[in-house]
Image: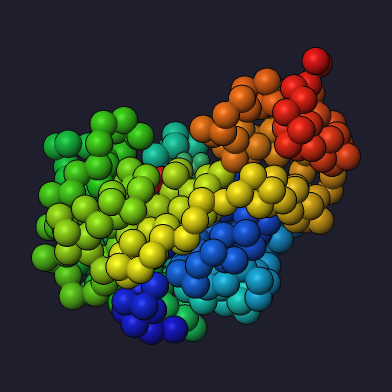
Amino acid sequence: MDIAKHLAAHPVVVAPMAGVTDKAYRQILASFSKGLLYTEMVSDKGLQYRNDRTLEMLKVDKEEGNVVLQLFGSDPKAMGEAARLACSRSRAVVLDLNMGCPVEKVVRKNGGAALMRDKETARKVLRALVENADRPVTVKMRSGWDFDSINAPEIARIAEEEGAAAVAVHGRTRSQMYRGTTDHGVIREVVRAVGIPVIGNGDIQSPEDARRMIENTGVEAVMVGRALWGDPWLLGRIDAYLRGSKPPPPPALEARLALIKRHAQLLSKEKGENVAVREMRAHVPRYFKGQPGSAPYKRHMNRIETLAELDELLKAYQRGNPPGS
Ligand SMILES: Cc1cc2nc3c(=O)[nH]c(=O)nc-3n(C[C@H](O)[C@H](O)[C@H](O)COP(=O)(O)O)c2cc1C
């Protein structure tokens, strides 16, 4: 894949989100967009030890669209092997290196955002990925480790030198986690620092936010995360706005409820009914966000045990018949 061309044609990208952008949700998102769509992060060590659940994460179906498989780790040898295994078993079109994850469990082992503090290891890991991959490699990073070490432009240059095809930048430091706001200035600096495409990420919740990110920074594309959770229709709204075409109408209630049902069915096919229903407890309140009168239904989700009960709950909402009434 020629990433620059692809981003120019499809400038809205789905962010990697562990627990959200799994196979089921990717299939839903792909029905709204031809843009790149990142997987949840996949552990290099999990692949090295052939952990069943990690290997399962390599499987990408045609219905999932243009998938970017994200790897995390800090051991160049394990990452090289992970890249080879991923390329032999996955139909993802791009591999990505996670240099942005802030969680303690990952940075303690020098992975995720911790790689931004260790430029030499970052370079070696990236080199191992590029050498062992038969498809483009990208990097997703934060603005830096903390406010005293903002170095995304330098890390992006290293990525370019090592052969990365694009970089995505979330304009927050690791120490900010998800607090504060996205710094468009750093993202602009990255755009100035490299010749490869830059994808801007952080706090895009509306088509106007996407336009602002592009105008303020000069990025080729925008990456959207949290705002897409429960609102995959946003992909179409942003895309239409950036193209200057008429936005699609908001989904009718029937379409919203049908999509929730489809999401549950896809999850159930992948993970079984029990896990699917438990995971839907996190997704359904997102789909219902801002929907009038939805609070009792959202609360009731925690008591739902089967897909049939979920179906009943959705029908009750449609009839305006709150649970327990
Ligand atoms: C639930 C959740 C899981 C995430 N998992 C990952 C991940 O696996 N890899 C990664 O690089 N970033 C991950 N992120 C960060 C997002 O990709 C994105 O950078 C961040 O949410 C900022 O974008 P947003 O404001 O559009 O959500 C995650 C974020 C959330 C909220």
The residue shown at (33%, 43%) is: 203
Q: Position of residue 303 (x, y in %)?
A: 79, 23
Indicate the quadrant where residue 192 lies: bottom left
- Image quarter hosting the N terminus: bottom left
* Colouring scheme applied when the structure was drawn: rainbow
The residue shown at (81%, 56%) is: 269
Q: Position of residue 295 (x, y in %)?
A: 62, 22
Residue at the top extreme, as displayed: 325
Q: Is residue 70 left or right of residue 266?
A: left
Q: Please say if 268 is above or below 7.
A: above
Nearer to me, 317 or 305: 317
Indicate the quadrant where residue 121 lies: bottom left
The residue shown at (17%, 59%) is: 215
Q: Is residue 37 left or right of residue 300?
A: left
Residue 39 visible in this rendered orientation of the protein: yes
Q: How many marks?
A: 0
Q: Position of residue 8 (x, y in %)?
A: 32, 76
- Image quarter hosting the C terminus: top right
Q: Is residue 65 left or right of residue 257?
A: left
Q: Is residue 165 left or right of residue 247?
A: left
Q: Position of residue 144 (x, y in %)?
A: 23, 46
Q: Please say if 285 is above or below 265.
A: above
Residue 113 visible in this rendered orientation of the protein: no
Nearer to me, 257 or 27: 257
The residue shown at (69%, 62%) is: 55
Nearer to me, 299 or 112: 299
